[in-house]
Image: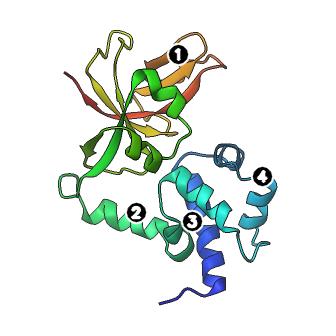
Amino acid sequence: MKTSALQRKNNIINNIDYIIKSRGETKVSFANRTGVTRATLYKILDGKVNNVQRSTITRIADFFGVSCEIIENHDLQSIELIENTLSPDGDKNPAAVPVIPQSAFLRCADKRVGQLVAHYPVTWFFGEVANTVALQVERNLGNLFFPGDVLIIKRHTPPQEKQLALFSSPTQALFVSDIHSGAEEASLLGAIIEERIQ
């Protein structure tokens, strides 16, 4: 069934709004991270753009690890609700997650997962996999993780209570903390959703 132009427009608006809220983003952070201008984002969300450019949809879809087809033609909130309700962990198909060496991790921070899977070995992960990568520890990360350990990282996702996250800063490069370090120059890379200790 083909989606009408009006339904496509409404799907885009609703899905962007849902993604921003469910991923803990603000409109400003969303615009900055996706490369979509704030003016464009506000016009889309206010319903003033009838035909959103494909390049804009691609940026949004790539950033959140979903397809353009889903953003344009489906209700992402309903899809995620069904997946979370009907597919308990362990009853899902595994997804390939690229395993990036610690020495290359910062250089890969802005690359799409699809690009990374083509250039790095993969590991399998059962769970919510949108925008998920793995870090192969090469040098100690504090006193928690050591060479050979693999950390599954949900990129651009803040940690939940007592959950560890991966950060970077000019002085510490990569470091792990359960809260934002408070240093203004520290950048959140993502929440650690699984640890595979060697």
Circles 2 and 3 in contact, beta carbons < 8 Å? no
Circles 1 and 4 in contact, beta carbons < 8 Å? no
Q: Earlier in the sequence, mark 1 or mark 3?
A: 3
Q: Nearer the viewer, mark 2 or mark 1?
A: 1
- Residue at the disc numbered 4: 38
- Residue at the disc numbered 1: 173
Q: Which residue shows up at 50% across the image and 36% down it?
A: 158
Q: Residues within 10 Å of mark 2 (few under 14, many from 20)?
A: few
Circle 1: element type: strand
Q: Which residue shows up at 22% across the image and 58% down it?
A: 92
Colour convention = rainbow
What amino acid does circle 4 point to? Arg
Q: Earlier in the sequence, mark 1 or mark 4?
A: 4
Q: Nearer the viewer, mark 1 or mark 3?
A: 1
Q: Residue furthest bottom?
A: 1
Circles 2 and 1 in contact, beta carbons < 8 Å? no
Who is closer to the viewer here, 141 or 58? 58
Q: Residues within 10 Å of mark 4 (few under 14, many from 20)?
A: some
Left or right: residue 84 versus residue 37 is left
What amino acid does circle 2 point to? Glu
Q: Residues within 10 Å of mark 1 (few under 14, many from 20)?
A: few
Q: State the quadrant of the C terminus.
A: top left
How far apart in space, not on screen, are marks 2 and 1 (Cα)?
34 Å
Circles 3 and 4 in contact, beta carbons < 8 Å? no
- Residue at the disc numbered 2: 80
How far apart in space, not on screen, are marks 1 and 3 (Cα)?
34 Å
Vertically, is 52 above or below 143? below
